[in-house]
Image (tube, grey):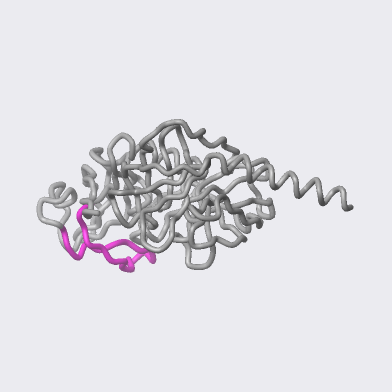
Amino acid sequence: MENELVALSNELAGAVEQAGRAVVAVNARPRFASSGVVWRPGVIVTAEHAIRRREEIGITLPDGRSTSATLVGRDAGTDLAVLKLAENGTPAATFGASETLRPGHVVLAIGRSPDSGVNATMGIMSAVSGPWRSWRGGQIDQYLRLDLTLYPGSSGGAVVDTAGRVLGIATSALSRIAGLAVPASTVNRVVDELLRAGHVSHGYLGLGLHPVALPDGNTGLIVLSAEADGPAARAGVLIGDIVVALGGKPVRDTDDIQSALDGQSVGKPIAAGIVRGGKVIELNITVGERPRRED
């Protein structure tokens, strides 16, 4: 038994060492640093909520040296931000497959502190399920809930398997009950878009909607307001219309609307089923891009 425990201990220490080669400390907020992962050569992924300034972002590399990085873009919906390293030479992470995870699998969260260096916590994957939308409106490919401690500087660090392969990015900002891992597939999608455009596009219709009961027992969304010259208004949607379908799928609450309006929908027509005067009509709405708030 003692030899087995020693072997397990050494394996976990090896996993931390391997993953830690690609984990940096990110100094972009007061009081304490967060963590980040060298996701691709010269590209760091970290937690968006830990980025409090756009300039003078300091990076502590795995070898202890200090350098700087610039903010490429951020997406609050997935709590991801992308930084560009001033120098390129730190090895990028190696990746595992989060698709094979099951509740009970042992995982580690790897972060880095400018003072104490690499740090690690161990626990299990407490829940695994399919795609979901965060309370911030981000579309995430898997729900990966962690049963481990995320210290204040751990957000933005790596969630890894027992071989040290990165499964996703740790965040404490997307759930009020536990830390989560943003899966690598979502991170790759967001990184691609931020590197290309500097922001993640979100579709919108320009409507104020509220659920309303229909005579047939179903629920639709009544139009309470329509933005002047917005996508829906240009297509002929009127106040008092009831939206019952979008993209061929029924809509019963605003989450259904958001699910149909991903970044790939911007600029494309989408069919909306509308109840007007007791009759169902169909209008084609060209999806707009949701206006972005300035950082």
Query: Horizontal and vertical percent for residue 45?
Result: 43, 44
Query: Horizontal and vertical percent for residue 154?
Result: 51, 56
Nearer the observer, 77 or 198: 198
Nearer the observer, 89 or 236: 89
| Residue beneath the point at 44% across and 38% down | 188
Of all residues shown, which one is farthest toward the right?
1
Give the vertical position of 50 relative to 196 (above or below). below
Nearer the observer, 255 or 171: 171
Q: Is residue 99 magenta?
A: no
Horizontal placement of 166 versus 205: left or right?
right
Report the predominant secondary structure element of the magenta stretch. Answer: strand
| Residue beneath the point at 59% across and 62% down | 149
Is residue 256 at all visible to an observer of this figure?
no
Q: Quadrant of the C terminus?
A: bottom left
Magenta stretch bounds: 205-226
Horizontal placement of 116 versus 196: left or right?
right
Horizontal placement of 2 versus 85: left or right?
right
- Quadrant location of residue 225? bottom left
Nearer the observer, 25 or 135: 25
Is residue 42 at all visible to an observer of this figure?
yes
| Residue beneath the point at 49% across and 49% down | 182
Query: Horizontal and vertical percent for residue 152?
Result: 49, 62
Q: Is residue 222 magenta?
A: yes
Give the vertical position of 90 relative to 230 (above or below). above
